[in-house]
Structures are given as structure tokens and as C-alpha cells.
Image (spheres, rainbow, N blue to C red):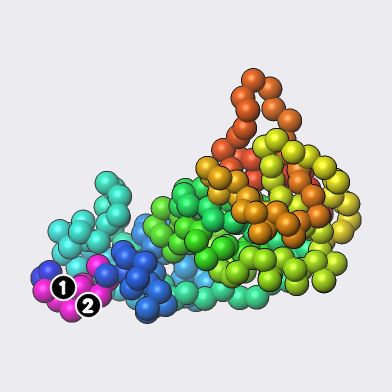
Amino acid sequence: MINSRDNQRFKSWMKLKLKKYRDETGLFLVYGKKLVDLALSHGIVDEVITTDEFIEGTLIDLKLMKELSQTETTHNMMAVCKKISKRIESKNVLVLDDLQNPDNVGALLRSALAFGFNHVVLSKNSADIYNDKTIRASSGAIFDLFIERLDLVPFLKEMKENSYQLFGADAHVSDNQPIGSKPFVLVLGNEGNGLSTSVKEVLDGFIRIETQTVESLNVAVAGSILMYAWGVK
């Protein structure tokens, strides 16, 4: 059993709570039986860590598990996982243009999986998908999606050359509606500033959701509605 904060393995797990070390090592943490089981089923688990002697894995003291936890709830198991994203060809692609809130990104990943947007591209300044909040909000959807972090404008131009139609969500403007049967890229903008100018210039048009009373919706809610409405079935 590991029961000392000075243990080198414990120190390495603690570092994985920070994006810098997740990027350096290609590893990330998941917490709780549901997410650990999902990660195991996808073959990406490097090590299971537990406070329960009846669970197969590295046994640690409860006080250390509490330190590793990133929420008020301390689980009896967690796992160190490898960053692996298998390429998936998808007729529907979700693009996130500088979304900052991990909860929004996670919720959108969950909806993307639900509505057949199996390829997701994030800008370099979007929230980290391996942030614990993102993983929990995605309910494990990150394990089943092809996720990339790219410069958006070159990617969008390439998709246009490959006959994808490119549409951005806009709270105020709607024009040139998508063609239902044609491969579709939905671009969602930053929570406060919307779509970046350089991205707007590449798009084929903009779509909005008609609302009553409220001016606009949370980006995760709006994005989910648009994926359901416009995704190629």
C-alpha cells in the first residue's frame, strides 16, 4: 500500500491534475467506477488506483485518495489513462472555436456522440478535454469520439474542399440554410465573443435558433439542439 505523500508514484499522479503534465506525459485521470470501467473497456488504462483491497489495482491510503480527488466526493477507485483518439470518418463534424468552459465542452461532447457528430475539432485555445470537469460532463463520451486540436481555418478550408458544408451558430443571424443530405460541419463560438472573424470568413452561412423571451441560449444547449436538428442522419 502507498501511504506517503513522498512516494514518487503518488507525486506523478498529483501532477496529472495539471494540464502541463497531462500534455507532457500523454496521460490523464478519471475517477469513479463508471468512468474507470469505460476506460478499461476501451483499453486505455495505464493503472488503476484504489482504496479498496478487493479491487485489482494499486492500493493507496484514503487520505492520499482524498488529495488526488478533484471534487468534494472521494471515490474508492480512479485510473491513469493514455490519451488515445482513433480516427473516425463522420458525415457530421463539430468544431469548437475557443470555447473556454470545461462543462460546456464536456456537455457538447456528450451530445456530439448522441447525435452522430463523431469527429470533434477544438481550436488551440479551447478548454482541455482531459480536464476532470470536461470528462465528467461528457459522461465518458471522450472515449468514443475522434477528437483533434487544430488551427481551425486550414481545417475548415480542407473540409470545404472535401464537399462539407460549413455553418456557424449565431444568436442573431440566419442565412443560407444547410442542405440536409450533404456532409455537415457545425461551428460553435466562444461563450462571450461568439465566432472569431477568421472563422466566419470561411463559412458557407449561419444558423440560429428562434427563441421566445430570452435573447440567446447557453452554447451547450444551443449546440445540442443544432446537432439534433441539422446533423446528417
Disc 1 secondary structure class: loop
Q: How many marks?
A: 2
Counting from the top left corner in percent of width and height, residue 38 is at 49, 64
Counting from the top left corner in percent of width and height, residue 149 is at 56, 69
Left or right of 199? Residue 109 is left
Dominant secondary structure, magenta: helix
Q: Residues within 10 Å of mark 1 (few under 14, many from 20)?
A: some
Most foreground residue, 49 or 230: 230
Q: Amino acid at mark 2?
A: Arg
Q: Quadrant of residue 159?
A: bottom right
Q: Residues within 10 Å of mark 2 (few under 14, many from 20)?
A: few
Counting from the top left corner in percent of width and height, residue 50 is at 27, 66
Instruction: Please tell me which residue is depicted at 85% across the width and 45% down the height of the picture.
Output: 177
Q: Is residue 180 covered in magenta?
A: no
Q: Amino acid at mark 1?
A: Ile
Disc 2 secondary structure class: helix
- Which residue, given by chain and number where applicable, does mark 1 sit on? 2
* Vertical comparison of 24 with 54: above or below: below
Q: Is residue 143 visible?
A: no
Most foreground residue, 190 or 34: 190
Most foreground residue, 188 or 30: 188
Instruction: Please tell me which residue is depicted at 48% across the width and 52% down the height of the picture.
Output: 100
Q: Is residue 61 visible?
A: yes
Cα separation between marks 2 and 1: 9 Å
Name which of mark 2 and mark 1 comes first in the sequence: 1
Proximity of marks 2 and 1: CB atoms separated by less than 8 Å: yes
Left or right of 67? Residue 135 is right
- Which residue, given by chain and number where applicable, does mark 2 sit on? 9
Image: magenta residue range:
6-14
Left or right of 42? Residue 79 is left
